[in-house]
């Protein structure tokens, strides 16, 4: 009886299914869903880093007349390397061996600058973006199996500039537990760069991770703000607009960035737990912030920089300071006030021997010594590149908050 019921039920279901299918609209013609695709072109791998630290860069540009690799930080590639076109339309060039580190590059395709379309790794500047390649083998900045901190993109509203701004903030391993208060280190970038630069091409997060894991640096919060308040041009903010009489970034830093950090992060707010450093333009900004406010920072670092115009020339050889009182004359009172700098534990300068700002650094160091400051100054091989600035960070950070 049960078997007979199952047979009847099955037949009913089959009949119902046949009826529904007969009422359905006909399917779309198969021609509207093509199964064949045309030739996709050669597969391109770029960049390709070999075990012997050679880097091969490639780009598919079959109709291009000339392609060049650009990226002045890559050793030996100051003016760019001409790339060779293969029969498959792929242009390539191999450089090396290259010292371990992070390097920015782009392609110049028939005088048009383009990022590497086969690489998702990038580094931002103030007005453009670069492709990024990393050559492993550096003990202090490689990605290692150690506890890692976090780097966050933080949006804040600048009342000074009346617009939203962005900064990157590194919090050390363990910060997320919600316990403890940390010292804070403000780290400034150079001209034409952005708040992304120190954490991408500068490897700041990995450098701090490795130092902290090795017991060589105190756990700290590192704040990397955007140093530009407008388009960048040497000596100008952009176009034909002269620099404003008040340094907008300094005001943004003192009135908006520091208060935001101290309100929203578990950081100490006293001088002995604050540090500031910067490279190139950021080094000059560091001095413009720290020296007039001697009670705010116990540790001050200046990388490849100094007082712009102190030698009569500015960044890149541009004309130096405008007519009027010099930086030294403007700050004479605080420079000569030995009492006010008693809380300053370290004033640290470093510049490459081939850096175009080395005379600016030397003259600035001499000026501070003349006013009784104790200055630590070192000259390293190399020039005005991230190769030096990453090294300087790895040397400076262990000296903080000891």
Image (cartoon, rainbow, N blue to C red):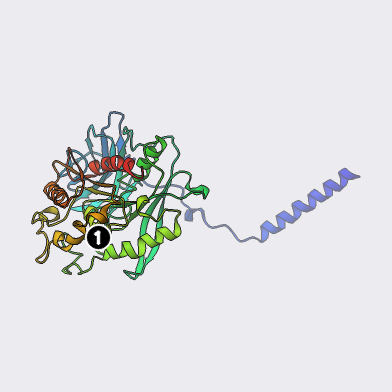
385 over 245 or under it: above or below:
above
Q: Residue 126: x, y in percent?
A: 27, 57
Q: Residue at x 15, y 45 (%)?
A: 355
Q: Residue 203: x, y in percent?
A: 33, 44
The crowding category of the residue bearing disc 1, from other C-alpha atoms within 10 Å (few below 14, some 14 to 19, many at least 20), is some
The image quadrant that residue 240 belongs to is: bottom left
- Front residue (pair 235, 321): 321
The image quadrant that residue 2 belongs to is: top right
The C terminus, quarter of image:
top left
298 over 83 or under it: above or below:
below
Q: Residue 97: x, y in percent?
A: 23, 31
Q: Residue 254: x, y in percent?
A: 32, 62
Q: Residue at x 16, y 55 (%)?
A: 307
- Front residue (pair 171, 73): 171
- The total number of labels drawn is 1
The image quadrant that residue 139 belongs to is: top left
Q: Residue at x 27, y 40 (%)?
A: 391
- Front residue (pair 55, 221): 221
132 over 259 or under it: above or below:
above
Q: Taking the image as drawn, is residue 63 in sight?
A: no
What element does badge 1 sit on?
A: loop
- Front residue (pair 2, 288): 288
* Residue placed under numbered mark 1 in the picture: 292
Q: Taking the image as drawn, is residue 303 in sight?
A: yes
Most extreme residue toward the front, as rendered? 339
The N terminus, quarter of image:
top right
Most extreme residue toward the top, as rendered? 52
């Amino acid at each position: 009886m049960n078997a007979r019921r199952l047979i009847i039920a099955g037949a009913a279901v089959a009949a119902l299914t046949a009826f529904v299918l007969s009422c359905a609209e006909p399917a779309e013609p198969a021609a509207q869903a093509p199964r064949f695709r045309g030739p996709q072109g050669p597969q391109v791998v770029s960049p390709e880093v070999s075990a012997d630290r050679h880097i091969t860069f490639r780009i598919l540009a079959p109709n291009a007349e000339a392609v060049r690799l650009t990226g002045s930080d890559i050793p030996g590639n100051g003016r760019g390397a001409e790339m060779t076109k293969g029969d498959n339309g792929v242009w390539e060039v191999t450089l090396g061996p290259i010292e371990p580190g992070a390097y920015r590059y782009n392609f110049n395709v028939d005088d048009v600058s383009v990022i590497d379309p086969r690489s998702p790794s990038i580094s931002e500047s103030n007005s453009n973006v670069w492709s990024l390649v990393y050559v492993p083998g550096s003990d202090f900045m490689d990605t290692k199996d150690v506890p890692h901190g976090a780097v966050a993109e933080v949006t804040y509203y600048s009342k000074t500039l009346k617009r939203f701004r962005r900064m990157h903030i590194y919090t050390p391993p363990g910060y997320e537990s919600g316990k403890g208060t940390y010292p804070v280190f403000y780290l400034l970038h150079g001209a034409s760069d952005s708040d992304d630069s120190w954490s991408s091409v500068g490897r700041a997060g990995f450098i701090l991770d490795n130092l902290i894991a090795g017991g060589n640096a105190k756990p700290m919060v590192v704040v990397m703000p955007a140093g530009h308040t407008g388009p960048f041009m040497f000596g100008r903010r952009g176009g034909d607009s002269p620099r404003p009489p008040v340094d907008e970034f300094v005001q943004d830093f003192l009135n908006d960035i520091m208060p935001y950090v101290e309100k929203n992060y578990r950081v100490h707010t006293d001088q002995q737990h604050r540090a500031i450093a910067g490279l190139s333009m950021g080094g000059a900004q560091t001095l413009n912030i720290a020296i007039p406010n001697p009670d705010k920072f116990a540790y001050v670092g200046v990388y490849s920089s100094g007082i712009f115009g102190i030698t009569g020339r500015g960044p890149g050889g541009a004309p130096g300071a405008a007519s009027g009182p010099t930086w030294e004359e403007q700050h004479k009172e605080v420079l000569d006030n030995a009492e006010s700098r008693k809380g300053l534990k370290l004033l640290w300068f470093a510049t490459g021997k081939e850096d175009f700002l080395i005379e600016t650094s030397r003259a600035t160091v001499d000026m501070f010594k003349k006013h009784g400051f104790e200055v630590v100054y070192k000259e390293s091989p190399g020039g005005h590149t991230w190769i030096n600035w990453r090294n300087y960070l790895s040397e400076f950070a262990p000296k903080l908050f000891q």
